[in-house]
Structures are given as C-alpha cells and as structure tokens.
C-alpha cells in the first residue's frame, strides 16, 4: 500500500512538472512567433511608407550615414533660411521634396517622427526605430549609365 502512495506522488509530481514545462515552452515559442510576426508587419508598413517618398528617405539615410548621432531636423519652406541652432540638425526643403509637409505628417502618423517645433520653423525628431529602419534600407541602385561608387 505504501508503494502505491509513493508511486502516485511521484506520478503526480512528474505530471505537474511536465504540464508546467509544456505551458512554459508553449508560451515561449508563441511569444517568439508573435515577435517575428510583429517585426514582419512593421517592415511591411515601413516598405509601404518608403514607396511613397523614396527620395526623402534616401536623403535622410545618407544624412544619418554621415552624422550617425543626429536625430533632429528642420523643415525649410519656400526660400526660408535657417539661422544658428543650438544643436546639430539636418535640414530638408520643400523645394527639393514636393509635398514635404504631407510626407512628414505620414511619418509622424506612423510614429516615426515627433514634432518638436520650438517657434516658427517646423522641427522634428526621428525615433530610434525610424533610424534603424532607415539604416536597414537598401542603397539605391545606380540607374543605367551610372556607376556605383
């Protein structure tokens, strides 16, 4: 009789452990799958946004390559000229990028930018996710007749 109680206790403990371990690993792998799905969804979302403004995003990517720690930029509308600023920043002009403010609003709506305008000249800060996505963008391919370099 004592043997049956011990066997039952051991069986119960092994069953409990197996159930707990199964639940743990199921949650672990479900979380990993969800993270992969979210990353894929974010990449797809960024690809759709990038298709709407390839020249602007390539310029931003190039600026970040040259100045990796800068995160803020000013928007110069019309023939505006920017005076001295207290910190390093980029400048983007609507004369070079038609519809610039609309493009920036799209980026802001997707959570890639934050409006940090101090006074009259629009100023934005890039999120670290946006910087990462820009850095991961493929380099533009040279068109026919151009050489990479």
Image: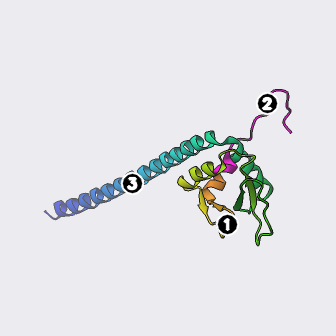
Viewer-proximal residue among 21 and 67: 67
Q: Secondary structure at mark 2?
A: loop
Q: Is residue 141 magenta?
A: yes
The residue that mark 2 highlights is: 143
Q: Which mark is residue 27?
A: 3
Residue for point 57% across, 40% down: 48
Give the percent coordinates (x, y) of residue 130: 62, 54
CA gap, disc 2 and disc 3: 48 Å
On screen, 69 above or below 63? Answer: below
The residue positioned farthest toward the front in the image shown: 79
Circle nearer the viewer, 3 or 1: 1
Instruction: Please rate how many residues cluster around mark 1, counting C-alpha atoms within 10 Å: few if below 14, some from 14 to 19, many from 20.
Output: few
**Dominant secondary structure of the magenta stretch?**
loop
On screen, 121 above or below 56? Answer: below
Q: Secondary structure at mark 1?
A: loop
Q: Is residue 113 left or right of residue 4?
A: right
Q: Which mark is residue 120?
A: 1
Viewer-proximal residue among 72 and 132: 72
């Amino acid at each position: 009789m004592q043997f049956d109680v011990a066997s039952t206790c051991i069986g119960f403990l092994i069953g409990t452990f197996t159930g707990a371990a199964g639940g743990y690993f199921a949650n672990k792998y479900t979380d990993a799958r969800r993270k992969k799905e979210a990353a894929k969804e974010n990449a797809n979302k960024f690809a759709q946004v990038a298709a709407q403004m390839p020249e602007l995003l390539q310029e931003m990517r190039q600026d970040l390559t040259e100045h990796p720690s800068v995160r803020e930029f000013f928007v110069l509308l019309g023939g505006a000229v920017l005076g001295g600023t207290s910190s390093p920043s980029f400048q983007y002009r609507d004369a070079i990028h038609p519809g610039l403010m609309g493009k920036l609003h799209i980026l802001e709506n997707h959570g890639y930018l934050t409006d940090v305008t101090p006074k009259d000249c629009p100023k934005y800060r890039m999120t670290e996710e946006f910087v990462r996505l820009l850095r991961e963008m493929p380099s533009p391919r040279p068109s026919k007749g151009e050489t990479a370099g």
